[in-house]
């Protein structure tokens, strides 16, 4: 559903069919998964519990939902078919929130929750529960919807849902840090006790934990990954940037690497194996295998639509790479790079093949870190293509990965020490 679209009451989603982009039905919605937050902030809708034709129930993140309309849910087509397991911070809407007795803050009157509405936030991919449909009066017998006035109220107008009221240890801590950037949350986790760190990591959803792991020191990454169930560890690795996931996998014993790779989606596992085949401090070892790749007949409008993807880092969104098919790395022949600023200067119908910067020589996967760093410094780049001898684009190196490998291993500790000892406000405050 597009940003700004009308709200949807969850009762209308019960049993709704879920389709892939080709129109094939993959299952039906059986519940919604939300995360409660502190200070009566509306819960965040994490995803849907979908029952497949095999009766297995899986989790479908909202990031993989492209539309909710006309009594159907449309997905990106990428589904993780592992059985759904509810986590400590998660609440099931149908199973735990509906039919619940809560209190109207203004009058102190107890009411029964009959329905909840969800709405996508403007200009974002996040979804929230924003309103509650309640019935006044007490329950009578087994019939939950006894006679009484029904009203719709804002989430903030009732009590009985919040984390503070439920006293949920690690969940309250997690909700308190919800607005932190991944790097700042990683800094918080790094300085928690091992037990507390494991509790918070277990409560994070896969995408959030993946973002945080990418910012943690190697020892913390290995410790946290080792305390997750292997199926979930594989899910988190899939959610990480391929280069970061490959670096982490490389630090694990070989038998553990193979177990985790066998649990991953075949395409993701193939990317991991390819990245792990390169030396760590080379362009091949630093690159991500998921840059923006466009065919020569793509237009500026196509390129800008890809650049707008909220999941892309600013460095990866700074340029697109024009290649002949196939579009997935390793691609067909690499034709050149188009920088974001150039995209803004030309009409939307212009073909990207006419805008490529052909003077910029790509990196070789075997180029050592000093060569890569010199390339970035010489050409003032934030990302650079990596091309093999046959002319195929293998991936792209971003400046953040170069810096991460050039800084001392303990740079996070040094930064934290300076913040504490010299009165510098921590980043993000």
Image: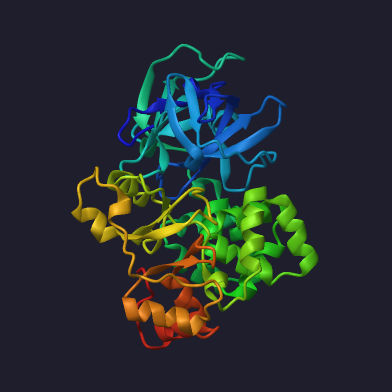
Of residues 70 and 31, which is closer to you in this image? 70
- Residue 14 vs residue 234, the one in the foreground: 234
What residue is drawn where x is 32% and y is 76%?
379
Position of residue 341 relative to residue 122, above or below, is below
Name the outermost residue toward the bottom: 422
Q: Tell which residue pokes out farthest to the right in this image.
A: 255
Residue 60 seen in this snapshot: yes
Hey, which quadrant is residue 258 in on the image?
Answer: bottom right
x, y (%) of residue 329?
53, 55
Q: How many marks?
A: 0
Q: Quadrant of residue 239?
A: bottom right
Which quarter of the rendered picture does the N terminus lie within? top left
Q: Nearer the viewer, residue 53 or 100?
A: 53
The quadrant the C terminus occupies is bottom left
> In the image, is 422 to the left or to the right of 33?
left
Q: Give how far across and how far down residue 146 sits, in percent.
A: 50, 13
Q: Is residue 204 above or below residue 24?
A: below
Residue 28 in view here: no
Residue 376, by quadrant, is bottom left
| Residue sitting at the far front | 390
């Amino acid at each position: 559903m597009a940003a700004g679209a009308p709200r949807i009451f969850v009762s209308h989603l019960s049993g709704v069919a879920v389709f892939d982009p080709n129109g094939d039905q993959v299952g039906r919605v059986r519940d919604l998964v939300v995360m409660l937050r502190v200070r009566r902030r509306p819960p965040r809708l994490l995803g849907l519990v979908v029952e497949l034709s095999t009766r297995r129930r899986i989790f479908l993140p909202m990031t993989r939902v492209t539309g909710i309309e006309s009594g159907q849910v449309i997905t990106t087509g990428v589904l993780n078919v592992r059985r759904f397991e509810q986590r400590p911070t998660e609440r099931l809407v149908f199973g735990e929130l509906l039919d619940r007795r809560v209190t109207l803050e203004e009058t102190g009157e107890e009411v029964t929750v009959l329905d909840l509405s969800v709405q996508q936030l403007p200009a974002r991919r996040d979804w929230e529960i924003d309103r509650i449909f309640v019935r006044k009066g007490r329950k009578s017998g087994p019939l939950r919807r006894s006679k009484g006035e029904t009203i719709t109220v804002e989430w903030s107008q009732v009590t009985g849902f919040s984390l503070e009221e439920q006293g949920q240890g690690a969940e309250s801590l997690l909700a308190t840090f919800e607005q932190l950037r991944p790097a700042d949350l990683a800094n918080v986790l790094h300085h928690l006790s091992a037990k507390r760190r494991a509790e918070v990591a277990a409560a994070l959803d896969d995408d959030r934990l993946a973002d945080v792991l990418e910012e943690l020191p190697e020892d913390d990454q290995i410790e946290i990954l080792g305390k997750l169930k292997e199926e979930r560890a594989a899910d988190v690795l899939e959610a990480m940037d391929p280069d970061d996931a490959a670096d982490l996998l490389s630090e694990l014993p070989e038998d553990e690497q193979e177990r985790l790779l066998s649990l991953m989606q075949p395409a993701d596992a193939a990317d991991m194996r390819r990245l792990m085949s390169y030396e760590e401090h080379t362009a091949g070892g630093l690159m991500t295998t998921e840059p923006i790749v466009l065919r020569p007949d793509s237009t500026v409008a196509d390129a800008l639509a890809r650049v707008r993807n909220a999941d892309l880092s600013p460095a990866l969104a700074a340029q697109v790479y024009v290649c002949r098919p196939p579009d997935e790395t390793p691609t067909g022949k690499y034709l050149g790079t188009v920088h974001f600023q150039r995209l803004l200067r030309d009409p939307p119908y212009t073909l990207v093949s006419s805008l490529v910067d052909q003077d910029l020589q790509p990196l070789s996967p075997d180029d050592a870190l000093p060569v890569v760093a010199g390339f970035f410094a010489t050409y003032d780049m934030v990302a650079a293509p990596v091309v093999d001898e046959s002319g195929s684009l293998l991936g792209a190196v971003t400046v953040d990965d170069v810096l991460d490998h050039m800084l001392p291993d303990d740079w996070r500790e040094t930064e934290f020490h300076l913040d504490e000892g010299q009165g510098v406000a921590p980043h993000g405050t």
